[in-house]
Amino acid sequence: MTIAVQPPTESVVDRFLRYVRIDTQSREDQHTVPSTSTQWELANLLAAELRQLGAGGVRVSECCMVYASIPGNLPNSPAVPAVGFIAHVDTSPAVSGANVNPIVHRNYQGGDIALPADASQVITVAQHPVLNEMIGDDIITTDGTTLLGSDDKAGVAAIMAFVDLLAANPQIEHGPIRVAFTADEEVGTGIDHFDVAAFGADFAYTVDGSTLGEVSDETWNARLATVTFHGKSAHPGTAKGVMVNSIYAMADYLSRMPHDMRPETTEEREGFVHPYAGMLDIEHSSVKILLRDFDLSGLEAKERLLRGLAGETAARFAGVSAQVELKESYKNMKEVLTEHPQITQYALDAARRAGLTPFTKPIRGGTDGSKLTFRGLPCPNIFTGGHEFHSKLEFNSRRGLEKTTETLVHLAQLVAKQVKKD
Ligand SMILES: [Zn+2]
């Protein structure tokens, strides 16, 4: 079933090419949200464009979150669930997002794609077999010196084109729609400032995934362990029988980490433990360790393992004591979404209506949605057509952006047929 639609006032590709040129890189370990002032530029621009497109209640919060709403156009709109669409404006701190120079490789005819400004940057068919499915498409890359920022400006552009399309096509029936653009997703700090109540959606989707058709309703259960060994300092000249050097205890502890439970040795549904930063001195040595597992029982087993190994190490070193502190980072949203299977199903059905082959895939990471889901806003993640996030080889395509936009339109129409429970 195709609907005769007016095109948006600006194509999703043109929007995308405009947005990626704006530097919105976020930064780790900042005490403010947004972590970088550059994110305001895109947030304010999007707010202005949303107003221009006739969206209501447009505002940018003090933490650089953009909110907007589009009233339903159905006689029974108040009874229809309000559906939200969310994307993030920031790009990864891992690779520069300044002076992005997007390149459109029109009518791609196969083969590796060499990026012109850096000969060492080549998108190869061997590493990206998805290229085989993109013959005839217009592929969008960088010049090889920056990331592209498709993560997540593809999501931003698709949502904006979707709003544009709805404004141009009042015949498309939909219920209440909410739109939000968040800051500091990549550094994990923005979403704590997201106002779920004011957003006012019954459920939502982050548009922040990868391969066309891929919908994710599952993320890690994630905890952060801080393991500290305490020793005793003394002047090295008179240390005999007095000094207890915690650095040796830390070395012993790290050598006990299982080899088959690391990010570099696991994939798909296997969880891991990952020491990633620490500090050493004689009196106190501590290490931060990420714990990740899709199953809560698996995560708890990893926590017991880390505690057990710390106890074994402390027992080997006279005078050393171990301290293990755990903090929850986020939880697997599947725990909640499994009770609302229809929310994921709408996305899969919408992708199918857009001519794609939908599938679900767990994310070996977290999304803004993992936190929102546990704050009362169930929120699976939808593809954007982008690949190789956080790298200079990042790419997307015209079809990727168009199919994502089309999927959002179908999704709104599917939800429009539902009536709120309770
Ligand atoms: Zn993202």
Image: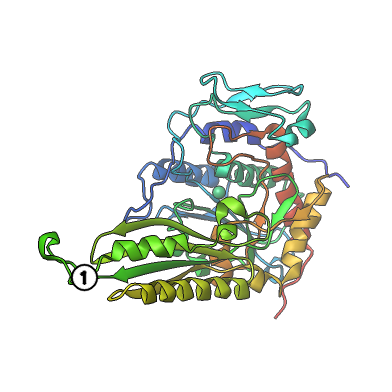
Q: Is residue 193 visible?
A: no
Identity of the residue drawn at 78% across and 50% down? 351
Relative to 148, is 419 on the left or the right? right
Q: Nearer the viewer, residue 51 or 236?
A: 236
Task: Please tell me whether residue 211 is drawn above or below residue 392 in the rendered image.
Answer: below
Point 62% across, 47% down: residue: 159
Graded by Cα atoms within 10 Å as few (under 14), some (14 to 19) or many (20 or more), the crowding at tag 1 reads some
Residue 410 in the image, given as x and y percentages of width and height: 77, 52
Residue occupying image coordinates x 52% and y 76%: 304
Q: Nearer the viewer, residue 316 or 355?
A: 316
**x and y, in percent, of residue 217 in the image:** 68, 62
The correct choice, above or below, for 336 with respect to 399 in the image is below
Split into 4 quadrants, where in the image is the C terminus?
bottom right
Q: Secondary structure at mark 1?
A: loop
In the drawing, does residue 47 fall left or right of residue 278?
Answer: right
Query: What is the three-letter code of the residue carrying label 1?
Result: Lys
Residue that carries the numbered disc 1 in the rendered image: 232
Q: Residue 345: which quarter of the image? A: bottom right
Where 215 sits versus 384, above or below?
below
Residue 249 drawn at (x, y percent): 35, 66
Residue 20 location (% of width, % of height): 52, 35
Q: Ligand 1 near label 1 (Cβ, under 8 Å)?
A: no
Residue extending farthest right? 1
Q: Can you name the residue that lies furthest to the bottom here?
A: 422
